[in-house]
Image (spheres, grey):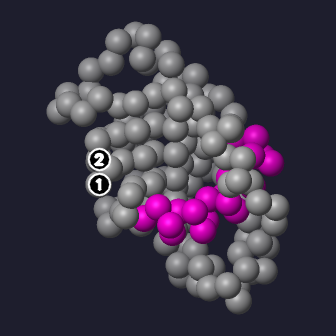
Amino acid sequence: MKNCISNLDSKINYSFWLAANKKLRMSDQHILELQDLFLSRGVHHIAAPSFKEGRALLYRFLNALNCYNHIACATNDGRTLKKTIFDLQKHMKSQNFFDKKNSDKRDVFFAEEFKFDFLWIEQSQSNYLQCLIIEDALVCRAMEQQLPIIILQVNE
């Protein structure tokens, strides 16, 4: 599989930073900007104070837009995702995709079974290296399918 990560910074839209406050109050302009992020193909970046707040924002917009049927998330945060979200990280661990000897099996999964129409990747400073292992495959495949990819970054 080709290496997409080397040029990833030039492909990421760093357009939204979620302010750290208890109440998620957004102006109409913020809502329109986020709507564009969720509906635009390519890699987008949202920074949030925590996974909890970032997920709340993602769930809120995904539910409001109601236009995606197969949503996937790559996370190693301990909290359970909603039942409608496919947990890629959990699946990849269960299939032992992080082991180099299973790279062919992983490539087959991304080539033949990766049928999602929206993807988000949760990234923190503590899981940054593990995210890089899977981001290449995820982002390459998602970009081939021309779907929205949100990288949710927190400082936890």
Quadrant in the picture for the N terminus: bottom right
What kind of residue is marked 2? Ser
What kind of residue is marked 1? Glu
Dot 2 falls on a residue whose secondary structure is: loop
Dot 1 falls on a residue whose secondary structure is: loop
Along the polypeptide, which appears first: circle 1 or circle 2?
2
Q: Residue at x 35, y 12 (%)?
A: 27
Quadrant in the picture for the C terminus: bottom left
**The magenta stretch spans residue 146:** yes
Q: Main secondary structure of the magenta part?
A: helix
Q: Which residue does the numbered mark 2 point to in the structure image?
A: 50
- Using the image, determine if residue 54 lies above or below residue 29: below
Outermost residue, top side: 28
**Of circles 1 and 2, which is in front?**
1
Which of 26/61 is in front? 26
In x, y percent, where is residue 21? 20, 31
Which of 41/135 is in front? 135
Q: Which residue does the numbered mark 1 point to in the structure image?
A: 156
* Left or right for 59, reference 34: left
Quarter of the image where one finds residue 101: bottom right
Outermost residue, bottom side: 101
Quarter of the image where one finds residue 106: bottom right
Q: Residue at x 45, y 55 (%)?
A: 123
Q: CA distance from mark 1 to mark 2?
A: 6 Å
Marks counted in the figure total 2
